[in-house]
Image (cartoon, rainbow, N blue to C red):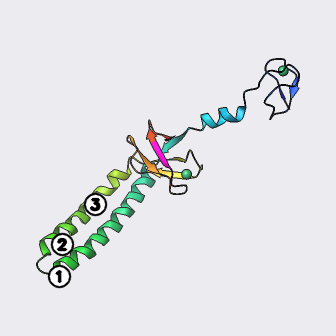
Amino acid sequence: MKKCPYCAEEIQPEAIKCKHCGEFIKQEKNEAEINKKSTDTKDIKGKGMALAFGTGIAYCSFSFTIGVILCLTGILAPIGIIVILTGILALFLSPFFGSASIEGDCPYCNTKVISLISKEGGVNCPTCQKRIVVRDKKFFKT
Ligand SMILES: [Zn+2]
Ligand SMILES: [Zn+2]
């Protein structure tokens, strides 16, 4: 039970209209939904760096494989070398990208979402696939 804000009589929590005074009650649920438009995030520098480094390693080994194949063709060897070099570069630069990571709850489905770059932009939630806008280190619904 809750109290009607107009006449202070007890009413049902789901009541849209007060049965005592006839006033329409603003549903709290709607307010909660509006408030849930954004969720707070926290910095996860170490975790983000580790994650980004993992991606860097994956990309490096992938580009190394592709690069070696290209080198073996002979004629495409210069491209192969460039591909390998970008892989090595990605490996060394990846922790820096990860250092700006933030973690928070998805404003749609409330699962943990990690955004590798906390600057203006957005991420797609890996669980519900919805677009999350990142602004002022907060997750917003689009
Ligand atoms: Zn009332
Ligand atoms: Zn989600």
Image quarter of the N terminus: top right
Q: Earlier in the sequence, mark 1 or mark 3?
A: 1
Q: Is residue 37 left or right of residue 122?
A: right
Q: Is mark 3 within 8 Å of ligand 2?
A: no
Q: Nearer the viewer, mark 3 or mark 2?
A: 2
Tell me residue 126's x, y (percent): 50, 57
Q: Nearer the viewer, mark 1 or mark 3?
A: 1
Tell me residue 101's x, y (percent): 42, 48
Q: Which residues are magenta?
A: 129-133
Q: Is residue 19 left or right of residue 141?
A: right
Q: Is residue 106 left or right of residue 5?
A: left
Circle 2: is it few (<14), some (14-19), or many (20+) Cα within 10 Å? many
The residue sitting at 27% across, 76% down in the picture is: 65
Q: CA distance from mark 3 to mark 2?
A: 15 Å
Q: Tag 3, which secondary structure? A: helix
Q: Tag 2, which secondary structure? A: helix
| Front one among 18 and 78 | 18
Circle 1: is it few (<14), some (14-19), or many (20+) Cα within 10 Å? few
Tell me residue 6's x, y (percent): 80, 18
Cβ atoms under marks 1 and 2 closer than 8 Å: yes
Query: Which mark, residue 80?
Result: 2
Would you say residue 61 sits in the magenta stretch? no
Query: Which mark, residue 90?
Result: 3
* Residue 134 placement: quadrant: top left
Q: Is mark 1 within 8 Å of ligand 2?
A: no
Query: Which mark, residue 72?
Result: 1
Q: CA distance from mark 1 to mark 2?
A: 9 Å
Amino acid of disc 2: Gly
The residue sitting at 76% across, 26% down in the picture is: 25
